[in-house]
Amino acid sequence: MEFRHAEILDAARKVFAAKGFDEASVDEIAHAAGVAKGTLYLYYPSKRDLYWEALKFGLIALDEQLEKQVNAAESTEAKIRAFIATKLNYFDNNRDFFKIFYAEFGDAVAQPAFCHEDLKQFNFKQMRLLTAALHDGMKRREIRNLPVEQTAFAIVNFTRGVIAQRLLGWAKTKKEEDVEFMFDLTWKGIAGR
């Protein structure tokens, strides 16, 4: 069933990304997944539940890749580069996920009281991953003393902004160029003097 679950969530992500939450129908998602509409309702009581599971599925996969790549890096410099590169690589491979992620993130900014707990926890987890790397970098004197929470927040949002530009088609650069630019700008701002 795990394989079927992934297929259903992948189909849901594609339909939600193409049509938005309001315009997407459970019928379209069932058709795209190759299952009966009733089968979807066995696992997901509502369209909203299916939407959140599709988003959560992508958040978990991105989170696993971020942790693996950042934790495998030896130096603070390598950890920051890994964070940026992993997010941009995941974006390039999962544009549908980022469309629904940004739709939900925009709603959370507009109405913070209604921000879904999974979205909050994902952002907090990214922050913790980066703050741990920054604290370690300061201890090892690889970076200068700085407010780590603000720095982590800046890196997360800088990365999110570049991904948004790419999603909108406004970026005329290659992914690798964006990674190098973002890393260079970030590293020059935090490296020890």
Image (cartoon, rainbow, N blue to C red):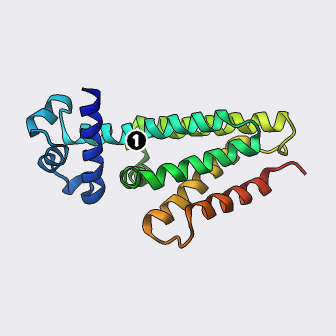
Residue 35, quarter of picture: top left
For image coordinates 20% across by 29% down, the residue present is 43
Judging from the image, what secondary structure is the residue with disc 1 in?
A: helix
Left or right of 41 in this view: 91: right
For image coordinates 77% across by 39% down, the residue present is 75
Residue 3, quarter of picture: top left
For image coordinates 47% across by 53% down, the residue present is 91
Under mark 1, the amino acid is Gly
Is 4 located above or below residue 191 in the figure? above
Crowding at label 1, few (<14), some or many (≥20) Cα neighbours within 10 Å?
many
Residue 72, quarter of picture: top right
Q: Nearer the viewer, residue 3 or 138?
A: 3
In percent of width and height, residue 88 lies at: 54, 53
- Asked if residue 88 can be seen in this view, the reply is yes
**Name of the residue lying farthest toward the right:** 193
In percent of width and height, residue 30 lies at: 15, 44
- Asked if residue 150 can be seen in this view, the reply is no
For image coordinates 75% across by 41% down, the residue present is 76
Left or right of 118 in this view: 45: left
The N terminus - image quarter? top left
In percent of width and height, residue 87 lies at: 54, 49
